[in-house]
Image (cartoon, grey):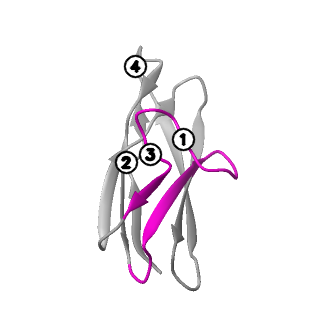
Amino acid sequence: MIVAFTVQSPVICGSEAVVYPTMSWEVTGATGVFIAIDGPGVFNSDPFPTTFSVNGHGSQEIPFACSQDFHNYTLSTVGGSPNAEQTKTITVVGA
């Protein structure tokens, strides 16, 4: 179960091509979580792991490509029953 899920929003890109907002979560009854960005499939980009181990809560800086006005970030639990999923839409301000 996802107890809490937040992503820093809005993000301010300025002249940056990519910024790294912080995603935070708290879950129960799961052994891990994974992150998807802008659709299905697990986000996996070095140095970010595919699945994060959990002991209740965690946080991770995640990439936000400033070439788009918004991105959808999905947090999914694994190793529990039932698995849970939540999505947040993050917008950009500034140019």
Q: Where is 4 relative to 91, above or below?
A: below
Amino acid type assigned to the residue bearing label 1 in the image: Asn
Q: Nearer the viewer, mark 1 or mark 2?
A: 1
Q: Which residue sits at x=60%, y=50%?
A: 42
Which circle marks residue 49 in the picture? 3
Sequence-wise, the earlier of marks 1 and 2 is 2
Q: How far apart are marks 3 and 4 (CA)?
A: 28 Å
In the picture as drawn, the residue positioned furthest to the right comes out as 40
Sequence-wise, the earlier of marks 3 and 4 is 4
Residue 65 x/y as whole percent? 53, 28
Q: Which of marks 4 and 2 is in front?
A: 2
Q: Where is 75 relative to 1, above or below?
A: above
Residue picked out by circle 4: 14
Dot 3 falls on a residue whose secondary structure is loop
Sequence-wise, the earlier of marks 4 and 1 is 4
Alpha-carbon neighbours of circle 2 within 10 Å: few (<14), some, or many (≥20)? few
Sequence-wise, the earlier of marks 1 and 3 is 1
| Numbered range of the magenta stretch | 28-53
Amino acid type assigned to the residue bearing label 4 in the image: Gly
Residue 95 x/y as whole percent? 47, 19
Residue 19 x/y as whole percent? 40, 29
Q: Nearer the viewer, mark 4 or mark 1?
A: 1
Alpha-carbon neighbours of circle 1 within 10 Å: few (<14), some, or many (≥20)? some
Which circle marks residue 44 in the picture? 1
Q: Which residue sits at x=37%, y=40%?
A: 21
Q: Mark 3 near mark 2, Cβ–Cβ under 8 Å?
A: no
Q: Which residue sits at x=31%, y=54%?
A: 59
Q: In this view, does 59 lie to the left or right of 73?
A: left
Alpha-carbon neighbours of circle 3 within 10 Å: few (<14), some, or many (≥20)? few
